[in-house]
């Protein structure tokens, strides 16, 4: 790989007139609620983070990337900055980064996150070659942080107040430390909110410098309508200049941020978002990964007749396809070695990426979500494989399969390495 990292216009102000970036809006969901955020999806005129005119799938994002480069060859960075958080949509984010890296080996890959769900993905980001990550850190004291967020969601649990603040902060600090361990360039965005955290910016800059962050971008809060902070006035240019000067004692400052939309494209001072709007919408209406790209069905089976294994138990999957007069076994495919955590299921989904469904006795919520996000439908059932294949390929008979499910009752006795299906 021969990537020239100096071509990043956000991290290197000297090249902002020569190189541009494209934001790929593949991440609609968010896992926290900032009191200044109002995400709109359909306003092409509004220019601020969190706003995009449409959402793309990873495959659509790759097509959009092709078209953007035809129109603006000076694009050197592909980034994901929402409109939600890249790691509240980790399957789409990682898939998009992989697709872009495979087709454009010289492209700088960049992500902007609130840091809540980032840490478990850092190894994979490094492996793909994501070189620049921005983490928004608005405070390093939970008593300050608690006033900035309405809630923080971790899986199905929602935290508020001081608990939310402590959890978010712990995740952010861990994420930044891990990014630096993997030699990834880290920019910290801090939103200055008058009366809430503007007295605390120096503490944030110092703590981030101690963690090894590379660049600090102190941004003025924009009072968005219909938000908790809508009546707090935007800090003045003078206030911002003073905050940046103080923060500069600890970290180099970014002073040329243009507060980009989640679908921004072009050079920082020469935005082409409106111009590319038609192209973006056209890409969003392209067919998603279709059944022609996913002709097969994976099956968790011991002997090739019955569906009789849970997802986490299967150390190999049979891959079945359709033929004129029925179904045929195409091959057996080993499951990737268990690496633990969500990555295990992402690796499995990649192994089965040409399969539209997987037939299993049972599976946990975490793999279920990952498989669905990556376009593989998990079908829980027991009994003859052919019955499951018939349901998948004809779209009929799913109800009959439901009554034939065998729930996982023995995680301790699981033969899938003891890691269960969750
Ligand atoms: Fe990365 Fe932010 Fe620049 Fe986009 S605007 S390329 S997310 S640093
Ligand atoms: Fe909005 Fe971003 Fe905050 Fe999520 S992290 S609530 S998308 S500003």
Image (cartoon, grey):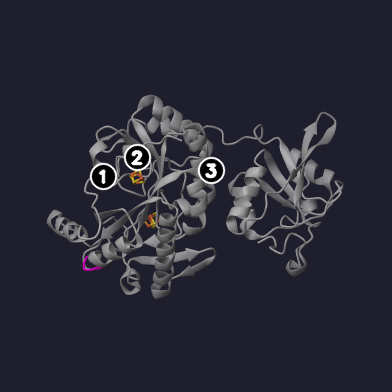
- Specify whether residue 16 is in view: no
Q: Nearer the viewer, residue 372 or 100?
A: 100
Question: In the displayed structure, does residue 334 sit left or right of residue 71?
Answer: right
User: How far separated are the C-alphas under marks 3 and 2?
Assistant: 20 Å
Which residue is tagged 2?
Answer: 264
Asked if the magenta segment contains residue 165, the reply would be: no
Task: Give x and y (percent) for residue 293.
Answer: 64, 33
Task: Tell me if 236 is positioned left or right of 404 in this view.
Answer: left
Separation of marks 3 and 1 at Cα, in angstroms: 27 Å
The quarter of the displayed image where residue 417 is located: bottom right
Question: Mark 3, mark 2: which one is toward the viewer?
Answer: 3
> Which residue of the protein is positioned furthest toward the left in this rendering?
238
Q: Which residue is mark 3?
A: 95
Residue 12 can be seen in this image: yes
Magenta stretch, main secondary structure class: loop
**Which one is in front, 120 or 35?**
120
Cβ–Cβ under 8 Å for marks 2 and 1: yes
How crowded pointer 2 is (Cα within 10 Å; few <14, some 14-19, many 20+) is rated as: many
Q: Is mark 1 within 8 Å of ligand 1?
A: yes
Tell which circle, 3 or 1, labels the residue nearer the N-terminal end. 3
Residues in magenta, as a range: 196-200
Residue 420 relative to residue 261: left or right: right
Where in the figure is residue 260, as x and y percent of width and height? 31, 44
Give me the residue at 44% from left, 61% from top: 116
- Residue nearest the viewer, comparing 223 with 177: 177
* Disc on the earlier residue, 2 or 1: 1
Q: Bin the neighbour count of mark 1 within 10 Å (Cα to Cα): few under 14, some 14-19, many 20 and up.
A: some
Residue holding disc 1: 258
């Amino acid at each position: 790989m021969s990537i020239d990292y100096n071509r990043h216009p956000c991290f290197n102000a000297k090249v902002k007139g020569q190189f541009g970036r494209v934001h790929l809006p593949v991440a609609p969901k968010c896992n926290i609620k900032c009191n200044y955020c109002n995400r709109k999806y359909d306003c092409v005129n509004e220019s601020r983070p969190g706003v995009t005119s449409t959402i793309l799938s990873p495959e659509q994002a790759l097509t959009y990337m092709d078209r953007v480069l035809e129109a603006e060859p000076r694009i050197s960075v592909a980034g994901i900055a929402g409109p939600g958080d890249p790691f509240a949509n980790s399957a789409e984010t990682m898939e998009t980064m992989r697709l872009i890296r495979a087709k454009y080996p010289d492209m700088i890959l960049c992500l902007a996150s609130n840091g809540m769900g980032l840490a478990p993905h850092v190894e994979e980001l490094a492996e793909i070659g994501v070189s620049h990550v921005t983490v928004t850190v608005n405070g390093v004291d939970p008593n300050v942080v608690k006033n900035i967020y309405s809630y923080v969601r971790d899986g199905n649990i929602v935290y508020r107040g001081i608990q939310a603040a402590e959890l978010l902060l712990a995740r952010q600090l861990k994420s930044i430390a891990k990014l630096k361990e993997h030699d990834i360039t880290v920019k910290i965005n801090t939103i200055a909110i008058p009366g809430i955290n503007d007295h605390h910016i120096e503490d944030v800059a110092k703590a981030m410098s101690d963690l090894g962050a590379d660049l600090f971008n102190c941004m003025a809060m924009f009072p968005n309508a219909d938000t908790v902070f809508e009546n707090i006035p935007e800090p003045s240019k003078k206030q911002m200049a003073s905050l940046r000067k103080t923060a500069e004692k600890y970290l180099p400052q970014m002073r040329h941020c243009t507060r980009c939309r989640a679908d921004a494209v072009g050079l920082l001072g020469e935005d082409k978002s409106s111009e590319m709007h038609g192209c973006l919408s056209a890409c969003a209406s392209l067919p998603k990964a279709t059944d022609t790209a996913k002709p097969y069905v994976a099956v968790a089976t011991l002997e090739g007749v019955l569906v009789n294994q849970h997802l986490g138990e299967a150390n190999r999957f049979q891959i079945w396809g359709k033929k004129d007069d029925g179904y045929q076994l195409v091959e057996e495919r080993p499951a990737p070695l268990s690496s633990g955590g969500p990555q295990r299921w992402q690796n499995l989904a990649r192994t089965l990426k040409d399969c539209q469904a997987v037939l299993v006795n049972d599976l946990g919520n975490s793999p279920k979500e990952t498989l669905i996000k990556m376009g593989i439908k998990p079908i829980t059932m027991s009994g003859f494989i052919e019955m499951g294949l018939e349901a998948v390929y004809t779209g009929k008979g799913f109800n009959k399969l439901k009554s034939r499910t065998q729930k996982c009752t023995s995680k301790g006795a699981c033969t899938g390495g003891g890691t269960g299906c969750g």
